[in-house]
Every structure is written in C-alpha cells, then in structure tokens.
Amino acid sequence: MTDGMFGAKGTGDTSGYGGLVRKASAAGSSERPYGSYFDDVADDLERAYPGFSEAIERVVVDRGELTLHVKREKLVEVALILRDTLKFEMCMGVNGVHYPEQTGRELHAVYPLLSMTKNQRIRLEVSVADGDAHIPSVVEVWAGNNWHERETFDMFGIIFDGHPGLTRILMPDDWDGHPQRKDYALGGIAVEYKGATTPPPSERRSYK
Amino acid sequence: MTTFDPYAPSRDTTEGKVFSVTGGDWDALVQDIGATKEERVVVNMGPQHPSTHGVLRLVLELEGETITEARAGIGYLHTGIEKNMEYRNWTQGTTFVTRMDYLGPLHNETAYCLAIEKLLGITDDVPERASVIRVMMMELNRISSHMVALGTGALELGAISPMFFAFRERETVLEIFEMITGLRMNMAYIRPGGVQQDLPVGALTKIRDGVKVMRKNFKENATLLIGNSIWMKRTQGIGYLDLAGCTTLGITGPVLRSTGMPWDLRKIQPYCGYENYSFDVVTADTCDVYGRFLIRMNELEQSLRIIEQCVDKLEKLEGAPVMVADKKIAWPAQLAMGGDGLGNSLDHIRQIMGTSMESLIHHFKLVTEGFHVPAGQVYVAIESPRGELGASVVSDGGTRPYRVHFREPSFNNLQATAAMSEGGMVADIIGAVASIDPVMGGVDR
C-alpha cells in the first residue's frame, strides 16, 4: 500500500508519543439484568424470535447503550423482527470498524437502530473475517441503508450481498484499496490531473 | 444538423449522442436533439451547477419535461475527515468535524464532544454554563443555517430578494460568532469537557440586540414569500414524501416534521439540558416543499425563544466555569487579551513557568499528547438543522480516536431525491433538493 504521510509509520501518531495506548479490552458480554429498557428489548426479541440464542452471539451493555452481536447469516431475519415486531422502524445507517488484531473477525459493521414508537435506541453489530467480508444487505428491510452500505463498502471493502447496486460512493470508481482500513496509510497518494502527476507531500519534502 | 454549435458541441458515443451544454443558443440545441429522434433524454446536472445546492450531481432521465428516473451522484467534496481524525488527538478532532457540515459547525462539534464525554463518563460533569453556551451557540447556528436554506432555496427557484434579506440576517449571527469565537465559520469552539473560552465582555448585550433585530426582520422576510403566488405554485404539492417514505428512508429533520410527525431530538431525547427550555416543535402536514419551508421559517422564532432563555441563564451564571474541573482533561489555558492581542493567559503562563511544575507537566502532556479515553464505542445523536446528526465514536483507550463515523443527515436525506422527484417536472427537482437542504461538505465528509 502506501507509506504514510510525513514518514509516519506504525500507529501514525504525529505527537511523537506513539504507542501510548492503555490496553483496556472493550466491554465483554454483559449479564442480566441489563438495566434500563434493555431487558425488555431482549425479552421481546427472545419471545418474537425463536432462534435468539443461536443468532445473537453476545449482548453487550456499555455506557448506557445496548449492542446485539448478530451472526451474519441471521442478520436479515433479526432485522425484520426488530423492525416489524419490536418497532425499530428506523435504521440510522451502518458504519464499519476495522480491528486488524481480532483474527477471524477483523471487520465489524455497526447498525444503530431507532424506534420512534417506543423512543428507544439499540445497536446491531456483525463481525466478519477479512478474507470473507460478506454481509447480507438490509436494504430490503430499511431502504435508507442503501447509501450507507455503499459507503461502508467503499471505505472498508465489506461486500453487502443483495445490495441493489453496490458501487463506490465517495471515492472515484477506479480507486485502489479501501481508505478507512487500518492497513491503509494516511496520505502518500500521488495526484493525477490531466496527464500530469503531482507526488504526495511525503515525497515532495523530507520531514524524516 | 451538421453546423457546429460552440455552446453545445456534440459527440457520438456507444450510449448515443452526447451534448455538452454550457449556455448559449437553446433553439439550436433543441433542434439538434430533435434530430436524434430519441424519446428519452438523459440529462446530467452538475456537479458544477448553480442550482444543485453545492457540488451535487444529478443524473435525470427525462421524457419531455417529466423525470422518469433521478439519481444523485456525490463524493465530489470528500475530504477524508474521518480518516484524518484517527491521526490527531481527541481535542484536535473538533477542528476537523467543524468543517464537515460547514453551515452547522457548532452542531458537528457538539455531537462529537458529547460522544467523547460519554466515552469518558463525564457527561454530568460538564459545567452548566458550558452547556448553556453550547445550546445558545447551536440555536444561533440553527438560525444562520436556516437562513442559508431559505435564501438559497428561494434563489434556486428564481426569487432573488429573499436571498439578500436572508444573508443579511445570517450576517447578524456570524458577527456574534466572530465576537465570541473569533471566527465566522469552522470555529472549533466547543471542546471535549466544555467550550474553548468564556464569552467576551458585551457578548450578551450584542446577542440581545441581535435577537430584537432578527425578530423584526424575520417577519419582513416571511412576507416576501408567504402568500406570494409564484412561490406557492412552485412549492405546494412539490417534492411529496410522506411519513412511511421518511421512515423507510431514515429521513429526519424538517423533512420528517413536514409529514406531521413531531420528532425533534431536542424534545424527545434531550441533551445539553434542552429539557430546561420552553420551545415548541414545529410541524406541518403537507409533506411538500412548502411545508418544509414553513417549518424552517417558524423554527427561527423557536430558536430566538431558546436564545433569550439562554441569555437569561448566562446572566445568572456569570463567572461560572466553562470547562470540566478535571485537570487531566480540561484544556489547560484560557485565552486572554494581552498587550499584543488575544493569546494565552499571562496568569496561566506565570503559573506554569514560575510556580507550579505540576501545571507545566499537565499543560505539556495535554497539548502534545492529549488525554486518554477509555475503550468502548458510543453513538450520540443530536438534532442538527437538517435532522439527526449521529456521532459513532470508537476508542481503543488511546489518545486518539480509533474510529469516528458521522451519520450525516444530509447524506442520508439526499437519498430521498428520487422518491421526491420521479414522475414530476424537471423544474421541480430543484425545489425538492433545496427542501432537503443538503450540505455537500457534510454529505461527502
């Protein structure tokens, strides 16, 4: 890929204090009671969807937010139940997160849901392996996810199977790579315009 | 037709004959197109077109003057803000987010800072004065944003005077912004834990005066369009999208409220203490461009009401802190006016250089490295002038964001272009897009 701007390698920390990360693992599975309306959501979903224990890998309650980790094969089924029975009629899009160190589940897709009827918010999370980055599309369930899935494909390379037209949306159609992935460095890309090429800033001057 | 038209040169492609139109003689163009004997014409509008509300590209398939298919092309203003933020510390991120939706910079900053505060678990520690200032600045921002929406929306439909008046009112707000933050746009004024600096002397008086002037002028502006028969004909029944359409497309903001749904996060899921202000959620039930126009007009008055309540509160909170007390998070220096202009407070410099080694260390660590944010992810949504602005923020425990994603209302709402305009006249797509009020900086980020 590219080398990174201004010689920034590895973490790309420009403060000069690279690697100062407190290794605190993100919240693990939560135990009942979840608190707030989260128990009701989980109960309702279990009642309405017999395959709950099989489809939901983990339930995480962190900082007052409920996250359901869903197996990708069951995503559309769960989404339909959530929309029709639990009244989560709005999906606020999808966004990717790339965790290169989580082998086998590097790419996560996160769907924030909103129920206007019940004034509740929950989140769905689906994780897939880098080599098999396929997730079923939920455009059939929430049509508004069309552009969001295109953006996530554009930025992370997650392929949403069944999407009506999965093309790049923000980057040019012939772009190489998926810029928001952690292995894609910042900058370092030459600009081409009308046949002339301007080298990237990192090669124009030496900051090293 | 074989004569060469310098304004509309044509070339043959596999798709059929392609004409590039840059102005000039329409009769010649119409004749040329007539010669192709095609019923169906595909028109490419933009991305550099004066009425597409920014660098938006619309691909329209027409039969006569009726749109059979409309597609929006975006990405012309993509700046990689979300990626860049991963390489700067948490506080520096405000400088990026403020540039996304450039008509609502303070909303972007607030959403981002509320998300960081939620990750840090300090939501309740943000001082009241800071929250009131945030609310006041956001409502002022809502006015300036709606002024652009109304002014350019009218301009795009051919009404020029409302634009002049709208930009005059916007100027009042921008002058207040300049006085308080030093900048008219892209202020990076709202910071994790509070705001960058306290209000300067005389700011509240200026805001009170500004509110009086605006309230008078808004009535004047309204009379230019409400009841104007051309305006009514261009907007009523145009760009129809009902509640079911809004729900399935995830549409929020004035477009959703124009279906009669009183959904406003300020009321329903309050943040920054919005529950302590009295204001009304404005709705319309016409589902059309006119309804959205009326909503924006009437929201101006509601914003003025909130601003007045903020000024009253701020007078009582004079001298209270505007940044969290935790020295591990709070930006160390407040700005102060010195002999050579605005700069770091001399008291602060005296303290870190002369008396307190610990303060110096804190200052150095916070400014070079930033603060750590515990690992986790949050989603925080606020009501921006265009709808639900959501900040999805992920931290890995470091001093820089691991991933930041903004659920931009403009990005989402622009998907409604096809639903609003297909089957309608080509002239009406301009009104429909203007009523969504997309800001391309926010759409493309």
Image: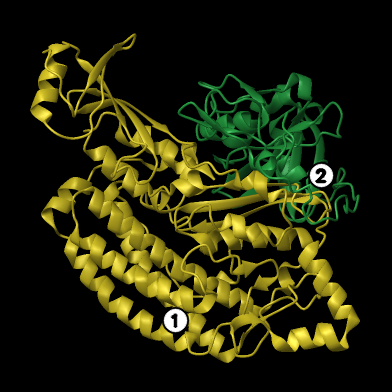
**Amino acid type indicated by mark 2:** Thr
- What colour denotes chain A? green
Disc 2 and disc 1 on one polypeptide chain: no
Q: Nearer the viewer, residue B297 or B330?
A: B330
Q: Which secondary structure, mark 1? A: helix
Q: Is residue B422 above or below residue B335?
A: above
- Give how far across and how far down residue B345 sits, in percent: 69, 84
Q: Chain of mark 1?
A: B
Mark 2 is surrounded, within 10 Å at the Cα level, by few (under 14), some (14 to 19) or many (20 or more) other residues, namely some
Location of residue A52 in the rendering, given as x and y in whole percent from the top left corner: 77, 30
CB atoms of marks 2 and 1 within 8 Å:
no
Residue B278 in sight from this viewpoint: no
Q: Is residue A96 left or right of residue B388?
A: right
Front-lying residue, B23 or A93: B23
- Amino acid carrying mark 1 in the image: Glu
Residue B419 in the image: state x and y as whole percent: 36, 33
**Chain B shade in the render:** yellow
Q: Is residue A108 left or right of residue B409?
A: right
- Helix or strand or loop: what does disc 2 sit on? loop
From the image, state whether disc 2 or disc 1 is nearer to you: 2
- Give the labeled residue for mark 1: B308
Tell me residue B392's x, y (percent).
66, 48
Q: Is residue A178 visible?
A: yes
Q: Quadrant of residue A188?
A: top right
Q: How is the image coloured?
A: by chain
Q: CA distance from mark 2 to mark 1?
A: 47 Å
Does residue B289 appear left or right of residue B281 in this picture? left
Q: Which residue was labeled with disc 2?
A: A11
Quick check: A158 above or below B301?
Answer: above
